[in-house]
Image (cartoon, rainbow, N blue to C red):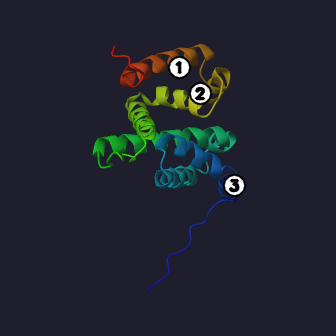
Amino acid sequence: MAEEPAIAIPDELERAFRVHHGLVFRTAYRITENAADAEDVLQTVFLRLLRRSNSAEALQSEESYLRRSAINAALDVLRARQADRAEELVDLPGNQARGEALDLRQALSMALSKLEQRSAKIFILRFFEGFSNPQIARMLGISQVLVAVIVHRTRRQLRKELGAYSGDRS
């Protein structure tokens, strides 16, 4: 049996992986809440970067690109999970509060997966990653006003989707 040739990995990509793999994994894990899915996202993001290794955009603002890629890939995982409905809801025995928290996190994940991609990305950068509106605007190359509007609308939409958990039936 012949050995497969090794894939040549550019030095920049190897360095980017060493420096940023934790960032990509943590970002994906915060969204998917699943280590296996976060690992899949990590692989997807760096495979995409390998394919784009000559792209000036990808290497110019590496951290921003990787964070956005991780968010996009994690949202894809959530959307696929919702579409398949293959994952059963896990009920934690004995502790109703923990079970309700788990249900709420799952509901939030599902609600995020229904959002327009840009809205979900901005919401995640703001509330999961802790970036300010001006930082998000610079990262995405859009105005701070647009970021604020999208954050406001997304929060309103999520509040509506998750109304049952806060006692709001509107």
Query: Quarter holding the N terminus?
Result: bottom left
Residue at 40% from the left image edge and 41% from the top image edge: 78
Give the number of the disc on residue 102.
Answer: none
The residue carrying mark 1 is 151
First in residue order: circle 1 vs circle 3? 3
Between marks 1 and 3, how big is the CA–CA gap?
A: 34 Å
Query: Quarter holding the C terminus?
Result: top left
First in residue order: circle 1 vs circle 2? 2
Q: Residue furthest front?
A: 94
57 or 107: which is nearer to us?
A: 107
Residue 53 vs residue 101: left or right? right
Element under disc 1: helix
Element under disc 3: helix
Disc tally is 3
Identified by mark 3, the residue type is Glu
Circle 1: is it few (<14), some (14-19), or many (20+) Cα within 10 Å? many
From the top left corner, tell me how far across and down residue 69 is, in percent.
54, 42
The residue carrying mark 2 is 126
The residue carrying mark 3 is 12
Report if the CB atoms under discs 1 and 3 are less than 8 Å apart. no
Q: Residue furthest bottom?
A: 1
First in residue order: circle 3 vs circle 2? 3
Between marks 3 and 2, how big is the CA–CA gap?
A: 29 Å
Circle 3: is it few (<14), some (14-19), or many (20+) Cα within 10 Å? few
> Viewer-nearest of labels 3 and 2?
2
Identified by mark 1, the residue type is Val
Residue at 54% from the left image edge and 32% from the top image edge: 124
Report if the CB atoms under discs 1 and 2 are less than 8 Å apart. yes
116 or 29: which is nearer to us?
A: 29
Identified by mark 2, the residue type is Arg
From the top left corner, tell me how far across and down residue 168 is, in percent.
38, 16
